[in-house]
Image (cartoon, rainbow, N blue to C red):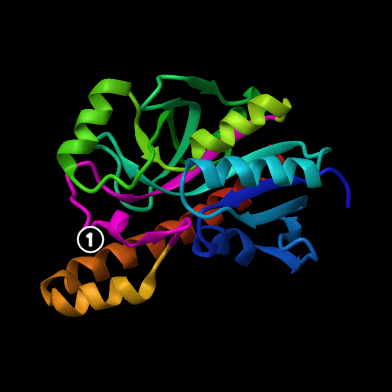
Amino acid sequence: MSVPIIFAGAFPMEINGIKKHGRFRRAENGCFEGEAGVSPAILAVSGMGDENAYRTAKRLIGLYPDASAYVSVGLSAALTPELAPGDIVGAAEVVEASSGNVYPSAPGPVAALSKVKCRVGRFAAVSKTIITSDKKKEIADATGAIALDMESGGAARACTEAGIPFISIRAISDTLDEDLPVDFNLFMRGGKIDMTRLILHIVAHPAKIPPLMRFGGNSRMACEKLGEAVESMMGAI
């Protein structure tokens, strides 16, 4: 295939919106190869977290060394009160909340964000899921970021090392003033959620079912909005 753009999300759900708006087939290496809009593209799943995102980016860059850009995609928590579920955000730069290291996004991909309704600003990269509104506000005050996620930092670091243009484009799943219904960190195994343990926890705490359903609905809607945004941007990245 000609020069592709690589898109990587932590979960299959995070790339499904892009897949829905494109034409893809599973490759022998486990990725999806095809076209998003008029542009050749690669879709991949990294698993959650900084190190999974870093290792996946290194592997994909090795598989597709001629890639024109690497795009970290998925869900994000809002760090500013103006953002609502489904809103699209783009990273002008990514700051690691723990170290303060900053990774600027490539100018070309940032310019492509003008094709969609999108809030552009700094992203905070964190090492675990942030559960409470108070902690989100603490990170917002410390970093000046508009949104946070767990994968943008690792992917940006790998792209900086390889000299590959990078950007993170995400959709908001939860607002600044919203606590998550479950501490998902308790159920993580190797970058994935242990669904059996999570379901058993929910069965034991049925009051969490309604807020968890709302969060799930917002996340699915956000992933669909993300797919629409990427479709609009293709050809400009």
Is 234 displayed left or right of 148 in the figure?
right
| Residue occupying image coordinates x 65% and y 31% | 159
What range is drawn magenta here?
165-192
- Residue 146, image x, y percentages: 34, 31
Task: Specify whether residue 63 is in view.
Answer: yes
- Residue 137, image x, y percentages: 20, 33
The one nearer the camera, 66 or 99, is 99
The picture quadrant where one finds residue 184 is: bottom left
The C terminus sits in image quarter: top right
Is 197 displayed left or right of 210 in the figure?
right
- Kind of residue at badge 1: Val
Q: Residues within 10 Å of mark 1 (few under 14, many from 20)?
A: some
- Dot 1 corresponds to which residue? 182
User: Which residue is farthest front?
Assistant: 189
| Residue occupying image coordinates x 36% and y 26% | 98
- Residue 87, image x, y percentages: 38, 47
* Label 1: which secondary element: loop
| Residue occupying image coordinates x 77% and y 52% | 38
Is 158 displayed left or right of 96 in the figure?
right
The one nearer the camera, 49 or 141, is 49
Is 217 displayed left or right of 16 in the figure?
left
| Residue occupying image coordinates x 35% and y 77% | 196
Q: Is residue 4 above or below residue 216?
A: above
User: Does the stretch in magenta take in 158?
Assistant: no
Q: Is residue 207 above or below residue 83?
A: below
User: Does the stretch in magenta take in 188?
Assistant: yes
The one nearer the camera, 14 or 237, is 14
- Residue 134, image x, y percentages: 15, 38
The one nearer the camera, 97 or 229, is 97
Task: Specify whether residue 109 is in view.
Answer: no
